[in-house]
Every structure is written in C-alpha cells, then in structure tokens.
Image (cartoon, rainbow, N blue to C red):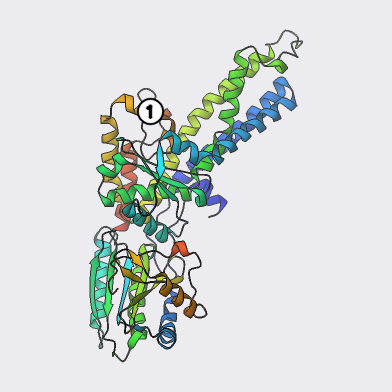
Amino acid sequence: MGLWETITGRTRPKRANLDSLFLVPSAAITLETAAGLTPTGDGSVCYRAATGAGFHQTQDEIVSLLRSAANAPDVQTTADEFGFTWLQVHREPDDPEGVAGLCTDLHAVNTTLESEGFGPGLLCSLVPFSDPSGRRVGLVYLYKKGTFYPFAPSGPKRRDNLLELQVRDTLKAELPIEPELSGWLALWGAPGL
Amino acid sequence: MARSRFVGDAGLTVRMTSVMFLLGALFVALVVGLAYAAGGGLGILIGLVGIGVAVYQWANSDKVAMRAMRAREVTPEQAPELHGMIDRLCALADMPKPRVGIADTPVPNAFATGRSPDRAVVCVTTGILGMLTAEELEGVLAHELSHVAHRDVLVMTVASSAGIAAGMLTQGARFGGLGFFGGRRDNNGGLPVWLVVLLVSLAVYAVSFVLLRLLSRYRELAADRAGAYLTMRPAALASALQKITGGINQIPQRDLRQVGAASALCIAPAIGGVSLKTLTSTHPSLEQRLEQLARIQAELSRPSA
C-alpha cells in the first residue's frame, strides 16, 4: 500500500488473479505419479455472495451456463458457517475431460464473477485429491495472492501437516506455493474433503 | 473489460487531504511562531519534542490501548470462530493477519491498534461478541481491519504532533515560562515572551483539537467504506452500528469513563458527547455512516447490464 493510499485512507478492493488455475491439471498428473493422489472429480469455488439482486442474477447465470454445456458437470451451491458460498462442480473421475474440464468450469465461474464486478469477493478455489488409503488433501488456490497450498484434514479440526508438506515439496517446481505457512488457511468442512 | 463496482468518494478524499494539509501547516506555524517569539532554537526543539512524543505513542500504541481496555490476546484455540473470521477476511483483502484480543467488558465495542499492519492488534469486547450476530461481527471486524490497512494509528499520531507540542508548551508557559522563556524580557514594552508563547500554543492546541476530530471522523467513514466493500455486505455493518450505538447509550456513565482513553480508535465512540457535538466528536453521526453504507449497497446490488 502506497503513501498516497495511506494519506487518503482509500484502499481499493483487491482484484483476483485468475490465471494460475490452469496449472492445476499438470500438477494433478505429478501428484498422481509421485504421491499416488488422484483427483476425486470435485472442484469448488469459494466466494462471498454480495447482497442484492445483481449478485443473485450473476450466480444464476453461472449455474445455468455450466449446466447448459453438452458434457455438463453436476453443479450445486452451498453456504458455509462463515457466510461464504461454495459453488461445487462434480465430474465423475472417469470423465474424459478430467481435471482440465473441471478447471475450465471453475474458470468460467471466476471470469463471470469478475466481469460483473464481483471479483473482489473471490476467496479461494479447491480441488480435492485422495489416495487408496482414504487420505484426502485439497489443493487450494488463493485468488488474491495467486498462490496454492495443500490442506489435508485428518479429523475434526486436525490437519495432517506431514502430508501437506509432502504435497508442497512435490509441487514446488510446478505451482506458485504460498510461502507463508500462516497463510495456509484451514477450510474445515469444505465440500469434497 | 471487467467492470468494477467500487465507487470512489472524491469529496471525502479531498476533505481528508485538506484537513491533513492544515494540520501540517499548523505544525509549521507553531514552530515558526515560537522561533519568532522565543528564538529559532527553541522553536525547532519544541517541534522535535512534539514529533518524538508522537513517535513514542505510535510505537507503543498496541500495549497502551490493550492495557487501557484491559484486553488479553487470544490464540486460535481459545477463540476459533473469531480467528476463522479474521483469517478469511485477511485472505480476502490480502493483508497480514493481525493479533486478536478480547476485552472483558460489557460495553459493546471493538478497536484496532498497533504501529504497522504487521504488528497490529484487533480487539473486541465480550459485550460486542454477545450482542452481534456472526454476520454483523464480521462487518465490524472488516471495519477494524480497514483501520489497520489504512495505518490509521500512524496517521492520527503524526497528525497530533502539533497538538502534543502545543499542549506541553501550554503546561510550561502557564507557570510563567520555563527558565529559557525568561531570558528575553527586554523586548521594549511588548508582551512578555511567555505570554506570547502561551497564546500561540493555546491557539494551536484549539485548532489542532478541532482538526484532529474532523480527521478522525473522515478516517472512520473511510474505514466503513473499505470494510463494506470487503465483506460486500454493507447492511451487516449498518445493523451492527445501530445495535452498538444503541447499546453504548444504555450503558451507565460509570463504565464509560473507565474506557474513555481508548475511544478514538473504537468502532463507535464510548463517550456520549453533549455540547459542540458535531465539532468535537471522534466519530461521524450514525445517519452519516448509514447514508454512506446505503450508497455502497445500491452500487453492489445493481443488476448486471
């Protein structure tokens, strides 16, 4: 934040960085080969729903856009206890479009929100992975920082930190990983985890 | 091209910068006035002392305010909901997470302090936790985080340095001057130097007091704005403000005096002003704040094309 913004007390809402989301498909292949973690076919975008008609109209447009495609995924929205909305997209794991299709769906959500002026409300997007032993880890993308981090819940309010660090080291070369561990926001009860 | 629902408030910016310019000019006037009345060295010395005290206050603002409000810092384990809320707001705003404090007092209030965004503390009272819904509390926290992002503690302390210097001079000159004011009584029948110093510093103090309160009100409006845009729910902050201001007026005066010191950085003023209310209150009126939030609400809910 600059001197002028400090003096005038005027912070503009931070814009979301949307581009890095397309790095997820190649990261998914790396995770599968190096750590045995496969995508569950879920994906979600977490955002703050603004009050009023404008936002509801936009959200309805997004949902109908996703559902109108030829190979349409399952789409649903839920609200969490912090007042954020999760728009969930589900494609079966054997879907030919796979994670790439999922990322295109998520990107469609982002760009529509952004173009209607709701970009500052985007919090994160989440792509969950699981391995045969049942461990789950979500790859979380923080829109405002443009970085990724892993989130692996191992029970109520418990995180599997070793798995998270392992995922970080596996993906270090491919994704911009959030360097501050304190910025690895816990997302308890996130859909798909 | 992505559209933006953010509407700037040019009027507020202009008013705020002019007030800050006037405060700077006031500081220069004090130094020059003193240099003229009592010698250049003294003017500069007083100026430096004023800045020094302001810097000291700024550097220790977190400890002082936390002690004045009898607040304690809480860990994520002790207050998971509060921390979770602040975590998300900080991720949304892309700012470092401040420390979190809770003050055990029934007065519903919240404040932010600390010398920089990296070392800030956001503190809420148990009164506000019990009174507000989660959504309203989030609005209040977003307001406080905006104070942190705008570095309001720094701005307000720097802005108050002229007032601090003038206040100290008034104290000194009241007793006929410190030793060094007495040295130049030979100014050919004019006013005694100590009297000139007293008059100058009293005038500076009074003007600085009014300007600071004005600046404080503008910073509150700016924080309301930024907070409403962060949560995208101006209505939640509006209903929180209505509840809090109503609640504060109901609390007995004895409790209010206890928290008076930290009032300038609170979400709503803890002292009910009576006379000269518009000139001397640290916070804008509820009507003014609600009016601004209503404008933001209208912009956010405007249907697309």
Horizontal relation, residue B283 to residue B24: left or right = left
In x, y percent, where is residue B305? 30, 67
| Residue B85 in sight | yes
Q: How many marks?
A: 1
Q: Residue at x 36, y 65 (%)?
A: A122
Towards the viewer: B27 or B116: B116
| Residue B22 in sight | no
Give the quadrant of residue B56.
top right
Q: Residue at x 48, y 46 (%)?
A: B13
Instruction: Classify 10 Å Cα crowding around label 1: few (below 14), some (14-19), many (20 and above).
Output: few
Protein chain holding label 1: B
Q: Residue at x 43, y 72 (%)?
A: A162
In x, y percent, where is residue B184? 75, 14
In x, y percent, where is residue A97? 33, 89
Horizontal relation, residue B275 to residue B42: left or right = left
Q: SS for tag 1?
A: helix
User: If the image is split into quadrants, where does the C terminus of chain A sit?
Assistant: bottom left
Q: Give amino acid for label 1.
A: Gln
Towards the viewer: B226 or B131: B131
In x, y percent, where is residue B216? 45, 37
Q: Residue at x 34, y 69 (%)?
A: A113
Residue under label 1:
B258
Against B175, residue B122 (above or below) is below
Give the quadrant of residue A31.
bottom left
User: Which residue of the protein is positioned furthest toward the top in this rendering?
Assistant: B189
Towards the viewer: B4 or B251: B251
Horizontal relation, residue B163 to residue A62: left or right = right
